[in-house]
Image (cartoon, grey):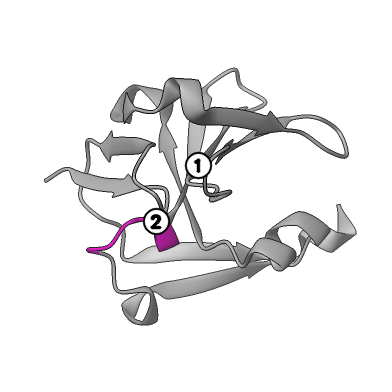
Amino acid sequence: MAYQGSCHCGAVTFTVDTDPPAEAMTCNCSHCARKGLTLTFVPAAQFTLESGQDHLRSYEFHKHRIDHQFCATCGTQPFAASTMPDGTEMRAVNLRCVPTVDIDALTITKVDGASF
């Protein structure tokens, strides 16, 4: 079953063609910690940007491997794009932008991104 998400103002909307996850990750890197991101990763083929391409802005830092996408209107980061070492295109979905996901019910893995 697919799930949908959006930025705060609704300009950017997306669909992920898989069941909502039971697990997610948080990261203590300077970027994720400041934004409070709760992420799941899906292959790019399962992610569809439904609207808002013209509202998206990009932010990259450190090694510039992750293209953090945020809405220029409301500032929310609904997802990011990246390529895995094996060449697989991935999307990091901010589950805080998915209203049907209960963040408190997820099993959270903490990643020490500050040490990367």
At label 1, the amino acid type is Phe
Secondary element at tag 1: strand
Between discs 2 and 1, the one toward the N terminus: 1
Up the image or down, 36 lies above or below 44; here it is: below
User: What residue sits right under mark 2 in the picture?
Assistant: 97
Relative to 102, is 40 above or below?
A: above
Q: CA distance from mark 2 to mark 1?
A: 9 Å
In this view, the residue in front, 65 or 98, is: 98
Q: Which residue sits at x=65%, y=62%?
A: 35
Where does the magenta region start and end? 95-100
Structural crowding at the residue carrying mark 2, measured as other residues with C-alpha within 10 Å and reported as few (<14), some (14–19) or many (≥20):
many
Q: Is residue 101 visible?
A: yes
User: Which corner quadrant of the image does residue 106 belong to?
Assistant: bottom left
Residue 93 point in image, percent of width and height: 45, 46
Name the spot of residue 36 as percent of width and height, x first: 61, 67
The reply to whether discs 2 and 1 touch (Cβ–Cβ < 8 Å) is yes
Q: In terms of image quadrants, where is residue 113?
A: bottom right
Name the residue carrying label 1.
Answer: 79
Residue at the spot 32% in from the left edge and 27% down from the top edge: 51
